[in-house]
Amino acid sequence: MVEQFRLEVRSWLEANCPPSMRTPVIEDEVVMGGKAERFKNPEAKIWFDRMVAKGWTAPQWPKIYGGAGLTPAEARVLREEMSRLNCRRPLFSFGYWMLGPVLLQYGTEEQKLEHLPKIARGEVRWCQGYSEPEAGSDLASLRTRAVLQGDQFIINGSKIWTSIAQESDWIFCLVRTDPDAIKQKGISFVLIDMSDPGVKVEPILLISGASPFCEVFFKDVRTPAKNLVGPLNGGWQIAKALLTHERLNIDEMGDRGEEQSLEDRLRQAVGTVDGKLADRGLRDRLAAYHMDNQAFRMTMECDTALQKAGHAPGAASSVFKWYGSELGKRKFELLMEGLGNDSLVWDGHGAPEDNQATRDWLRSKGFSIEGGTSEIQLNIIAKQVLGL
Ligand SMILES: Cc1cc2nc3c(=O)[nH]c(=O)nc-3n(C[C@H](O)[C@H](O)[C@H](O)COP(=O)(O)OP(=O)(O)OC[C@H]3O[C@@H](n4cnc5c(N)ncnc54)[C@H](O)[C@@H]3O)c2cc1C
């Protein structure tokens, strides 16, 4: 049965995945959907439309919510066949990776029918409004206030480090609905339309020269009470469930594939002797990195199979988040080491052509901060996984 499905998937992908969609995706061509989507590569649009029509942007979601209703085994076949052809992911979406799973679990039928198909079809781009200036690691201290008045929440406060907020249509937000309760008990999870009056977005410029995230301000924003997900003051449980999905998917979210392998880039940078990387120390560290990376990928695959078979990941997701982000940083450290002086400049006169590497290295510093810092993951692992 599954093997028959594999043959169908294989021939469909071969017939329908355009040539440029079989190469690693470049930053400019990442498809995130929503009103801001421009489809810089016309073949990305063709590919996206075809995958949406199959429901394969959300393969396991039920068909009524825009998915394809695939079984776990079928979804695995689709993943395998896509990677066999090097197919690009048709849609990179926080809505799919983070919000979708919690809506499926905690949303009302009305919320699922309203939001999930638009996520699967890439019509709406979502961002995540969790962190605040005084509430990052200590997220439960958040202060953005939502007061229920009749059938609306009135929202005041601000969020920070909100990735892609300037291009997003909606934001899923943690807000304080009971200031008198102990902190985790007074939080609710609400969905806010970014075009509502009173929502203001200000991009934050980073050292790498990019502005991938923003501050978001709410001033007397009116949000319908029906946009509350789960019970009033019951948002903390949903927040944690969403973070589990974020931590498990963070690797996938950042995975754009690579034009050139790390090894090739290092060969180019330091040269070779007898076909081997010329710098012996670097060669040893590269080999160690490859072995650790391979072991990590295999453990992740094993865990994905367990999840698809119904095993909740729980606190163990912190192990993956911690190890994956530290490993990601190691990769860019190796690249910088290989590039030597060339890694010191990334702009202007004298900058090497491949200056993207330095920007990527700077960006990699955020891996162990976003989605909860490495120190916080180690605390969770110590307490909740190892029981220390
Ligand atoms: C690239 C990137 C994208 C992001 N995108 C989003 C987004 O889309 N939406 C969103 O809501 N947030 C986002 N964030 C914010 C991110 O979730 C927070 O930065 C993170 O949770 C840390 O919070 P903080 O910055 O307030 O640091 P703090 O909590 O102030 O931490 C500062 C330092 O103290 C350490 N520390 C704090 N508490 C402890 C403790 N108990 N034990 C040991 N060490 C501790 C931390 O590990 C860290 O090193 C993003 C961050 C980055 C870097």
Image (spheres, rainbow, N blue to C red):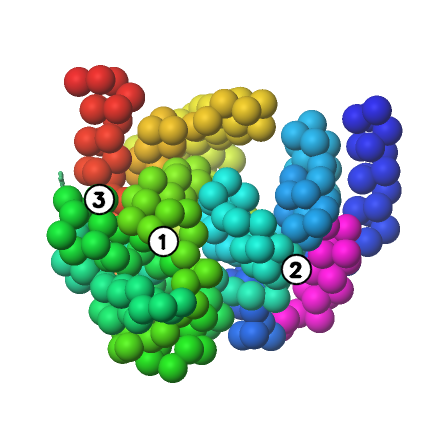
Relative height, residue 209 to residue 291 (above, below): below
- The kind of residue tagged 2 is Arg
Q: Mark 1, residues whose alpha carbon is within 10 Å: few (<14), some, or many (≥20)?
A: many
Q: Mark 2, residues whose alpha carbon is within 10 Å: few (<14), some, or many (≥20)?
A: many
Of the numbered discs in the image, which one, if any, rests on residue 151? none
- Residue furthest top in the image: 387
- Could you tell me which quadrant the C terminus lies in? top left
* Residue ID for mark 3: 184
* Residue ID for mark 1: 189
Relative height, residue 53 to residue 287 (above, below): below
Give the dominant element type of the magenta stretch: helix, strand or loop.
Answer: helix
Say whether disc 3 or disc 1 marks the residue closer to the N-terminus: 3
Residue depth check, mark 3 versus mark 2: number of the one nearer the observer: 3
Q: Marks 3 and 1, how far apart in space?
A: 12 Å
Tell me which residue sits at (64%, 43%) in the image: 61
Residue depth check, mark 1 versus mark 2: number of the one nearer the observer: 1
Asked if residue 354 can be seen in this view, the reply is no
Mark 3, secondary structure of its residue: helix
Magenta stretch containing residue 56, yes or no? no
Nearer to us in this view, 25 or 99: 99
* Residue ID for mark 2: 121
Tell me which residue sits at (36%, 74%) in the image: 222
| Start-end of magenta stretch | 39-55
- The kind of residue tagged 1 is Phe
- State the image coordinates of residue 121 (x, y, percent, origin top left): 66, 60
- State the image coordinates of residue 135 (x, y, percent, origin top left): 18, 54
